[in-house]
Amino acid sequence: MNGSDTKPSERKQYNFILWIFLAFILYFSVKEHWVHIVPYLPWLLLAACPLMHVFIHGGHGHTSHGNDKEHPER
């Protein structure tokens, strides 16, 4: 045996229950601490910009800009 006695369907059921449980925790945490979160929302928006640039766009140094004939050094 490989140490896992659960079937894939049971594992999906456990994952679903885990996600529901985490959603409840997140909902009630935000609901109870909303007063503490609101002052930081503008800063979170500003922090999202560089984070999206790094993680979504891959930062600088893209290699696929469409037409490589214009930029042979890439």
Image (cartoon, helix red, strand yellow):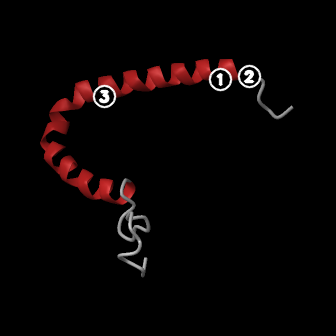
Determine crowd level at label 1: few under 14, some 14-19, many 20+ residues with C-alpha closer than 10 A: few
| For marks 3 and 2 on the same chain, the one whose residue lies earlier in the sequence | 2
Residue topped by disc 1: 11
Residue where numbered disc 2 is placed: 6
* Quarter of the rendering occupied by the C terminus: bottom left
On screen, residue 45 versus residue 59, left or right, reads left
> Mark 3: which amino acid?
Ser
Select label 3 or label 2 by which is in front. Answer: 2
Count every numbered label the image shows and give the total.
3
Q: Give the labeled residue for mark 3.
A: 29
Residue 65 image offset from top left, x and y in percent: 38, 65
Vertical order, 10 against 43 (above or below): above
Q: Is residue 35 above or below residue 54?
A: above
Kind of element beneath mark 2: loop
Q: Residues within 10 Å of mark 2 (few under 14, many from 20)?
A: few
Judge left or right: residue 43 versus residue 57.
left
Please name the residue shown 31% across and 24% down the image.
27
Residue 4 or residue 66, whichever sits in front: 66
Apparent side of residue 10 relative to residue 74 in the rendered image (left or right): right
In whole angstroms, how far apart are the C-alphas of marks 2 and 1?
A: 6 Å
Nearest to the observer: residue 74 or residue 9 = 74
Q: Quadrant of residue 53?
A: bottom left
Q: Residue at x 73, y 21 (%)?
A: 7
Task: Describe the element under mark 1 as helix, strand or loop.
Answer: helix
